[in-house]
Each structure stands twice: as structure tokens, then as C-alpha cells.
Amino acid sequence: MSSFLEFPIPKGIAFIAEVGLGGELRMVPQLEKRINPLAKLGYKKCIVPKSAEKILSEIHSDGMEIWGCKNLKEMIHTVFRRG
């Protein structure tokens, strides 16, 4: 999408999800354990499946913003609009 829009993905955004055939974002195993290492590596924002957003909001993630998206369309809008 970054190439199509000719706009780079904003710095500091990580993505943790599986993408279904219909474009939906799905949970991945051990999602909670993947967040803290990303924060330690300097990521400031993380895109996760919408179903995981509430669970992860309760976890201390060293100041990382957690953005939940239900599908690719929502994720693209979130990343390239908020950037």
C-alpha cells in the first residue's frame, strides 16, 4: 500500500496480525509477549486486530500506542491518515 500511495509507512509503527482472505485482521499466538520487545526496540505505535485492542490496553507497554483495526481497509486509513 505504501508503494501504491507513493507514501512511506510512518516511522515507528509495528503490525501484529494475520490477514484473512477477506482482508480481516486476526489474532496471532502470544500477542501480549510480542508488544514489550517492540517498545524496547523503539516502536511507538502498534496495529493489532480490533479484538485484541481492549486486552492489550490493560498491559503496560512502555508508552506504546495500541491501535485496533478490524480489516485492511481500516488499517490503511488509520496508518496513512494518522501517520
Image: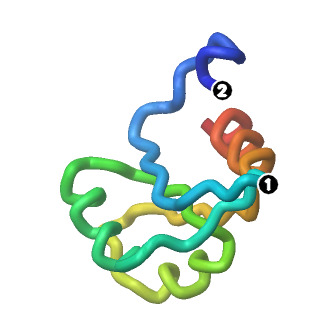
Q: How many marks?
A: 2
Of label 1 and label 2, which has the lower sequence position? 2
Tell me which amino acid carries mark 2: Met
- Badge 1 vs badge 2, beta-carbon distance below 8 Å: no
Q: Residue at x 39, y 51 (%)?
A: 44
**Which element carries disc 1, helix, strand or loop?**
loop
Q: Which residue is mark 1?
A: 22
Q: Is 76 drawn above or below residue 51 in the view shown?
A: above
| Residue 76 place in picture, x, y as percent | 71, 40
| Residue 50 place in picture, x, y as percent | 68, 71
Q: Residue at x 74, y 64 (%)?
A: 70
Q: Which residue is mark 2?
A: 1
Q: Residue at x 66, y 79 (%)?
A: 51
**Which element carries disc 2, helix, strand or loop?**
loop
- Residue 61 placement: quadrant: bottom left
Rendering colour mode: rainbow
Q: Residue at x 60, y 84 (%)?
A: 54
Q: Is 7 drawn above or below residue 57 in the view shown?
A: above
Q: Is 20 drawn above or below residue 72 in the view shown?
A: below
Left or right of residue 56: residue 50? right
Left or right of residue 60: residue 25? right
Q: Is 59 drawn above or below residue 28 in the view shown?
A: below
Label ID, residue 71: none
* Residue in the foreground of this view, choosing between 60 and 9: 9
| Residue 32 place in picture, x, y as percent | 37, 79
CA gap between label 1 and label 2 equals: 16 Å
**Eye-nearest disc, 1 or 2:** 1
